Image: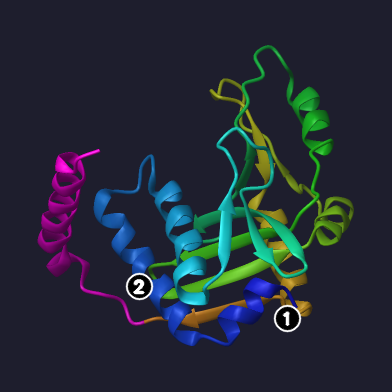
Amino acid sequence: MDLIISLFKSNEQALEILGRAWEILYIEGSSPDVGKRREHFFRLLLEKEFNLKVIPTPPTAKEVDFYIETNKGKIGYSLKTTEGISTIKLSWDSFPGLSKEEILKKAEKYPFTCPIVYVQGDRKRKKIAIYIFEPEDVELAKIECKNFWWIPKTGTNPRGYGISSRGVRFLIDMAKKKENYVEKKYIPPNVEMLKDEYWAKWYSLIKELALRSH
């Protein structure tokens, strides 16, 4: 069992916090940055709730989004979050002039060298789940899952690639068989009642930081 899954299974409150926070993060809207807000919150939750040393990688880094430092060395993870089961984007590189077949060849060369932490929220069902997709499972899914890859339609800009929702479901089934996942129904906060307080505290924080002396 992966370290992250083991930690969340031992601390149900942390998973409850993640589920409730998932709802609150939508106060600022869903596009275009809710994914980044979810990722930042998840990394901070690992630090604050589990006393882990989490080292984010630079935005330009490929595949590995953060490392967890342990007494046995650093463990690298790729972090992906979606609302519902959806496509996992791997590359947003633009490939002007390339055909779907040529982009598919690039996708097939994508290096899966570290586990993918897939955090999936479901605001309709009020459920939060974390799955670990091990590199060897991804490689097997590439072979056994039909239509594993997601390639944007012609004309989409930027044209990247990723794992299709079918591929994600296949990987979820593999994670469940290995018990490399954790999920929980959470009690949702009343987001409408929190909006004014959220923005008031947001303003106060920004003002405080803006006025802070060097």
**Residue 106, how many percent across, how many down?**
79, 29
Judged by its main secondary structure, the magenta piece is helix
Quote the CA–CA distance across marks 2 and 1.
Answer: 24 Å
**How did the renderer colour the structure?**
rainbow
Nearer-N-terminus badge (2/1): 2
Residue 213 is covered by the magenta coloring: yes
Which contiguous range is marked in magenta? 187-214
Looking at the image, residue 35 sits to the left or right of residue 174; the answer is left
Helix, strand or loop under label 1: loop
> Is residue 98 shown in magenta?
no
User: Identity of the amino acid at label 2?
Assistant: Arg
Up the image or down, 83 lies above or below 90; here it is below
Residue 5: x and y in percent read: 64, 76
Q: From the viewer's perspective, is 81 left or right of 141? A: left
Residue marked by disc 1? 179
Q: Amino acid at mark 1?
A: Glu
| Location of the N terminus (image quadrant) | bottom right
Residue holding disc 2: 20
Q: Which quadrant holds the C terminus?
A: top left
Residue 40: x, y in percent? 45, 54
